[in-house]
Amino acid sequence: SHIMSEYGRMTDTERDQIDQDAQVFMRTCADAIHQLRTEAHKGVQSAQVKEHRTAVLDFIEDYLKRVCKLYSEQRAIRVKRVIDKKRL
């Protein structure tokens, strides 16, 4: 329990770094999905293959959007706590 109390809490600097890294990662993922979408429609393919690739990329993009939303909600809670702490 001593180890948990000593290492269990993150500093604001560590949280800020995680936020920064998360934003970069989410942007990188969005760019990669866009690039994959562009590449998926190049070349001669059947309509079924195009439809399948579009569906897979839509699913991945939707998943990323849900992750981004969850991240935003958690970040809003953190910001609210900081504001509440400053008020006290």
Image: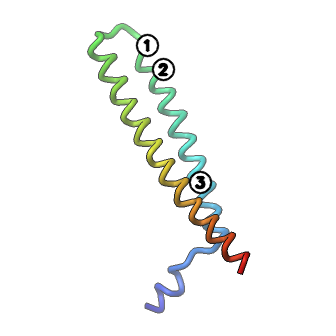
Is residue 6 left or right of 87 when viewed as pictured? left
Residue located beneath label 1 in the image: 42
Q: How crowded is the residue under tag 2: few (<14 C-alpha within 10 Å), some, or many (20+)?
A: few
Mark 3: amino acid: Asp
Residue located beneath label 2 in the image: 38
Q: Is residue 58 above or below residue 15?
A: above
Is residue 49 left or right of 17 when viewed as pictured? left
Q: Earlier in the sequence, mark 3 or mark 2?
A: 3
Mark 1: amino acid: Lys
Residue visible at 32% across and 10% down in the picture = 45
Separation of marks 2 and 1 at Cα, in angstroms? 7 Å
Residue visible at 42% across and 15% down in the picture = 41
| Residue at the far left in the pictured view | 48
In terms of secondary structure, where does tag 3 sit? Answer: helix
Residue visible at 37% across and 23% down in the picture = 54
Residue located beneath label 3 in the image: 21
| Nearer to me, 51 or 18 | 51
| Nearer to me, 3 or 60 | 60
| Residue at the far right in the pictured view | 87
Q: CB under 8 Å between callouts 2 and 1?
A: yes
Q: Is residue 19 above or below residue 63?
A: below
